[in-house]
Image (cartoon, grey):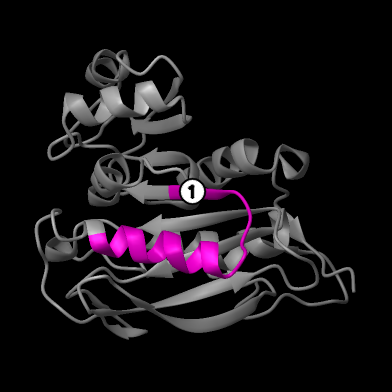
Amino acid sequence: MIDGPASEDRASEIRAGTVLPARREDVVLRTADGLDLVGELALPPHAEPVATLICLHPLPTAGGMMDSHLLRKASYRLPAMAGLAVLRFNTRGTSSQRGISAGAFGGGGPERHDVAAAIEFCAAAGLPRLWLLGWSFGTELALMWGNVPRVDGAILLSPALRRASDSDLDAWAASGRPLVALVPELDDYLRPAEAKARFARVPQAELIAVGKAKHLWVGETYVRIVLNEIVRVLNPGAWPLPAEWKDSR
C-alpha cells in the first residue's frame, strides 16, 4: 500500500490513498472583484505538462471543495501518470484543509469571477491546453462561465443542468468546443436518458453513461473509470492508466 510518494524500488498497487510524485505548489487566485481564492497546482514531477485540468468542485453548501475525492485523486495521480497539470481551488467562501477562500457562496452567479481567475492564472503561468473538469455544481460553472477562448473543452462529472440552461448548451454548440459528460446510471439529479435528450442540442458533446455509478462516484472502481476517461481525452498516449506504479527515476 502506498500512503505517500510511491516507492522507487518496486511496482506498487494504486489504491485510494495513493499519492504519486508531483511538483506541488500552494497558490492564491485573485478575482476581478477583489477576492483571494486558495488552491494548489500540481505539475508532472520531471517534465512539462502536456495539458491542464482546472477543477471545479461540487456544491460547497453540501460539502463540496477542492479536496472532494475525485479532484484530490486526479491531482494525486494524473501529473505523474499522464503528464497533466492539475489546478484545484476553493470557490468563494469555500473551505478545506488548504484554507478558506474569501467571500461568500454566491449560488453560481458571482462564481463567474472565480472561474475566470482560474483560467487567467493558468494562462499567465503558460500552462498548455486548458480543460475544465467540473463535478456536479462545478459542471454548472463550467457550462455557464467556461465557454471562453482560452478553454479548449470541458469534462463534466454528474452534470445536473439545474443552473445551466439550454442557452448555455446552445452557446457551447456554437463554439464547437468539445464537451464530455460522464453520467452515472443511478444519479440523483440527471440520469443518462434525460442527459442524452438535454445534451442533444450540442452536436459535439460526447455522453458516457456509467453503469451502477452514483452521483458521488464512491469506490475505486468508479474513480478509475473517471480518471481513465480524463486521460483518454487529454492525453490518449497515456491511456489506459495502469493499476500499478513504479517511479522510473
Q: In this view, does 27 lie to the left or right of 103?
A: right
Residue at horizontal 59%, vertical 80%? 24
Task: Name the residue: 46% across, 82% down.
Answer: 27
In percent of width and height, residue 166 lies at 18, 24
Which residue is at 44% across, 63% downward? 120
Q: What element carries label 1?
A: loop
User: Is residue 222 visible to us here?
Assistant: yes
| Residue corresponding to mark 1 | 150
Residue 138: x, y in percent? Answer: 29, 51
Q: What stretch is highlighted in magenta?
A: 113-132
Mark 1 packing: few (<14 Cα in 10 Å), some, or many (20+)? some
Which secondary structure dominates the residues rendered in magenta?
Answer: helix
Judge whether 1 appears above or below 212 on screen: below
Q: Quadrant of residue 140?
A: top left
Q: State whether residue 247 is above or below residue 159.
A: below
Figure quadrant of the N terminus: bottom right
In the rendered image, the quadrant that contains the C terminus is bottom right
| Observer-nearest of 35 and 102 | 35
Q: Which amino acid does label 1 sit on?
A: Arg
Magenta stretch: includes residue 104: no
Identified at 86% across, 70% down, the residue is 10
Q: In this view, does 124 lie above or below 159?
A: below
Q: In this view, does 239 lie to the left or right of 151?
A: right
143 lies left or right of 231? left
Whether residue 210 is visible here, answered yes or no, is no
Count of number-bearing discs:
1
